[in-house]
Image: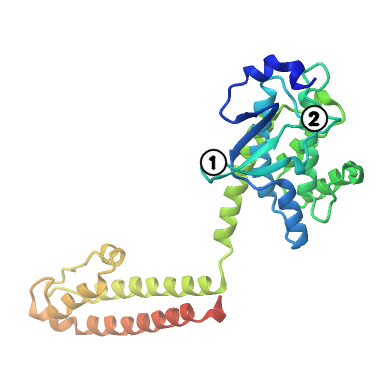
Amino acid sequence: MRVQQNRAIFEGINNKFIEKQRETLIVWQEYIPSFYEILQEKIDKKIKIEPIEVVYLLKIIFKLIFQIHSYGLFHGNIKPQNIHLKLRENNKEKSYVNIEQEKDYPYSDKSSLMPFTDVYSLGVIGLILLNPGNTKMNSKSIKLDQLLENLYVRCKDGQIPKQLFQVIHQMVSQDPDQRPILEYCAEKFETIEYEMTQLKSQESVRKLTKKELFILQKAKQIEQIKTNTLKEMNSRTEHKNQQNYWIDWNHVHNNMFWWKEYQKYFHGELIGSQNIGIKCFSCWNIYQQAQEQIDSLNNEILQWKDDDKND
C-alpha cells in the first residue's frame, strides 16, 4: 500500500528521528558510515571487518527501523545500498535509511508485509558483514546455509560471541514466528557490544609491548631495591640502650621520599644522638649503593624509551 493509500499513518507520524519529504520517510541518526560503503572499502583494501564494528552498526540500524515498525510501517527491501549519507543544514553529517521503495517494494501496512521481513533482511546483512571475504551483495549469489556454517565455525573458534551467533541465527530463521523483534535485537546487541568492549579492553592490557614489559620489569626491580634497602637500614640502627628505632619504611617507600630519611640517618637527626649518627655511616653506604643501582636501572629505562627498535 503506497503512501497515498495510507495517508492517515503517514500524517500521524511525529518523531524527531523520522523526517518527511513529500511522500518519503527518512529515518536519521548521528553520522554512521553506510554498510555498503564499509563493506566495499574494506574488501577493496583487504581489511578485516571486526565483529564489534558490525554489532555497533547493526544496533543503531535496529533502533532506527524499529521506529518505523512502531507506526505499523515496514521497509520490505532493506539492504546495504539503502543506507545512505546526508549532509544536513547544520553541516553535520547524518545517516538515514531511505524508505522510498523500488517499484516492487511499495509502502505497506500489516496486511502484506510484517516486521519479520525486515528482521530477516537485517539478519542477512549481519551474516554478510560477519563473514570475511569478498561476499557479493547480490542476494541471488548469497548462500545462506554456507554463511551460517561459516559463522558457526567462527563462533566455535572464539572469534565471535556465542550470543551474537544465536541472535543472527534467529533473525534468519525460515519460520517467521521464530524471528525476534528488532527492539529485542537492539537490546541484545547493546549487551553484546558492552561485553566485547570489556573483553577487548582486558586483552589490550595483557598484550604489552616488548618495551613496556622491559620498563615494567625494571620498575619492579627499583621498588624491590628500595624495600630491601630500607629493611637493612632499619635493622642496623640501634640505640645505645638496645632500644630499636624503626622508621616507617612503608610510608617512606610509598611517598618516594626515602632518600631524605637516609640523610637523617647520616646526621643522627632521628633520635638526636651523635653515637647513632656515627653508627649510621654503614646505613649511608647501603643507601649510596642502592641509589647507584637505581640510577643504573633508570638509565636503562630511558635508553629503551628512546629506542624505537624496542617497540
Q: Amino acid at mark 2?
A: Gly
Of residues 170 and 271, the one nearer the viewer is 170
Q: Residue at x 77, y 31 (%)?
A: 118
Indicate the secondary structure of the residue bearing disc 2. loop
Quick check: can you spot residue 126? no
Q: Residue at x 48, y 80 (%)?
A: 304
Dot label at residue 241: none
Taking the image as shown, residue 301 lies to the left or right of residue 91, namely left
* Mark 1 / mark 2, whichever is N-terminal: 2
Of residues 203 and 260, the one nearer the viewer is 203
Compared to residue 307, the image places residue 97 above or below, namely above
Compared to residue 216, the image places residue 280 above or below, namely below
Dot 1 crowding, Cα within 10 Å, few <14, some 14–19, many 20+: few
Q: Amino acid at mark 1?
A: Glu
The percent coordinates of residue 147 (x first, y second) are 85, 46
Of residues 4 and 176, the one nearer the viewer is 4
Dot label at residue 76: 2
Taking the image as shown, residue 3 lies to the left or right of residue 261, namely right
Quadrant of the image occupied by residue 207:
bottom right
The percent coordinates of residue 188 (x first, y second) are 66, 35
The percent coordinates of residue 138 (x first, y second) are 87, 45
Rendered-image quadrant of the N terminus: top right
Q: Nearer the viewer, mark 1 or mark 2?
A: 1
